[in-house]
Amino acid sequence: MKSEIVSAAAEIAREKRIDREDLRDILEDIFMTLMKRKYGEDADFDVIVNIDRGDMEIYVEKEVVNEVTDPDTQISLKAALKVDPEVEEGELFAEVISPENFGRRLINIAKQTLLQRLREYEKEKVYAEYKSRVGEIVIGDVHQETRHGYFIVVDRTEMFMPRSESIPKERLRRGDSVRALIKEVIKPDMLLGEDEQPRRRRRGHRPEIIVSRADKQFLIRLFEIEVPEIFDGIVEIKKVARRPGERSKIAVESIDKRIDPVGACVGMRGVRIQSVVRELNGERIDVIAYSSEPEIFINRVMTPAKPIRVIYNREENLAVAIIPDKDMGLAMGRGEANRELAQQLSGVNIELIKESEYYESTMDDDTGIDLEEIPGLSAAVVDKLREAGYNNVEELKALGLQGLLEVPGIGPKTAQRVLSHLNI
């Protein structure tokens, strides 16, 4: 028979995108509970709900008797014969129960229970769906800004981006479309501890979906979207270090020697990396080729600065990077961001020393030795240095890399080789 409760529940299910099978199970469970209240735990009954037709059938098995002493478990033979002319005394008869027979009080209980169960179902479904999507990028619209962060609506589901998970100095306004990473999904009963004070307004005790634009994983996912080689697994992101809104460093490696990992990430004319930079509100991104050799990798992670030399102490996990005097500002970065990110990416404590200070500290009593006495220095190089007016180690150390490069006939590779022969 048609049921207002079933019809109303079906309408709610359509609005809340609740599965019809799940709604049927909820309704059947509710009316099974009502049947037990009305007819007792021992009653033998069945509830069948048809969501498509909007009706419900309730049957309770009763014993056919001549004289009814217990109306909850018995039915008179006369009443049963009106439905089934072939029924006999002593048989079990399935009597159809109209929901109207439950009375107003039980019907109201059914409605309240249904609304409660639907709310619980919706919360569980939202939690399960988005828990499985942690780490995924979603696109939504900014619904509201508060002092604690932003509420963002994605497919009619509200998510929250705390200030700490937004990009500093990025101002989002109501109605703005924004991409963010699903970072965490918190069940309603996990939102507050016993002694914890609410950090922000709680909305109907629903699961709280935390999204982020400041997380490292957001940067990784953006590169996976923009760089097909990363998505296909040809280029691997080995490490990431990030200061949201300022600078990021990302180390990449290719499993195919024919593919340049840095070039793949940057793209032709920088189109790929610029797309990521725009999404991150102008954040600078250094893409670095990964190396398992600490000295080489540390040299690369200092970009945009180019160290003259890196001295690595494996036991102490400490590296000294010798930086040209003019590039010390680049090596440090604003607020020492470049050095700190280089340390995070390499996992090594990095000490920066100016080139002039390092050469001055390496001067000793042997610096007056003649050029011919320097092991490994070719005669051709010695001649070029003498022609330029330099005759001993002390003078070469005072020159440094920049000075050597100004000597006619001395190129970058030769200058580096000279300094390495001087143990610099």
Image (tube, rainbow, N blue to C red):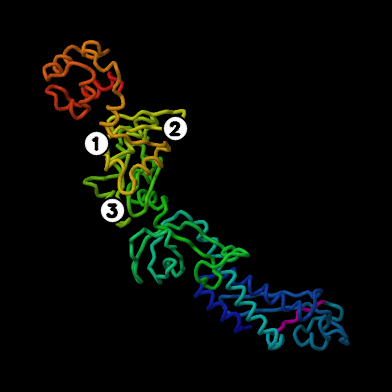
Q: Residue at x 35, y 34 (%)?
A: 298
Mark 2 to mark 3 CA distance (whole Å): 36 Å
Secondary structure under tag 3 reads: helix
Identify the image quadrant of residue 165: bottom left
Q: Position of residue 292 (x, y in %)?
A: 40, 31
Q: Which residues are magenta?
A: 92-97
Secondary structure under tag 1 reads: helix
Q: Position of residue 319 (x, y in %)?
A: 38, 32
Q: Are marks 1 and 3 in contact (CB under 8 Å)?
A: no
Mark 2: amino acid: Asn
Looking at marks 1 and 3 on the same chain, the residue that comes earlier in the sequence is marked by 3
| Residue 392: assigned label | none
**Mark 2 = which residue?**
317
Q: Nearer the viewer, residue 50 or 362?
A: 362
**Mark 3 = which residue?**
275
Packing grade of label 3 (10 A; few <14, some 14-19, many >=20) is: some
Packing grade of label 1 (10 A; few <14, some 14-19, many >=20) is: few
Q: Residue at x 49, y 75 (%)?
A: 15
Secondary structure under tag 2 reads: loop
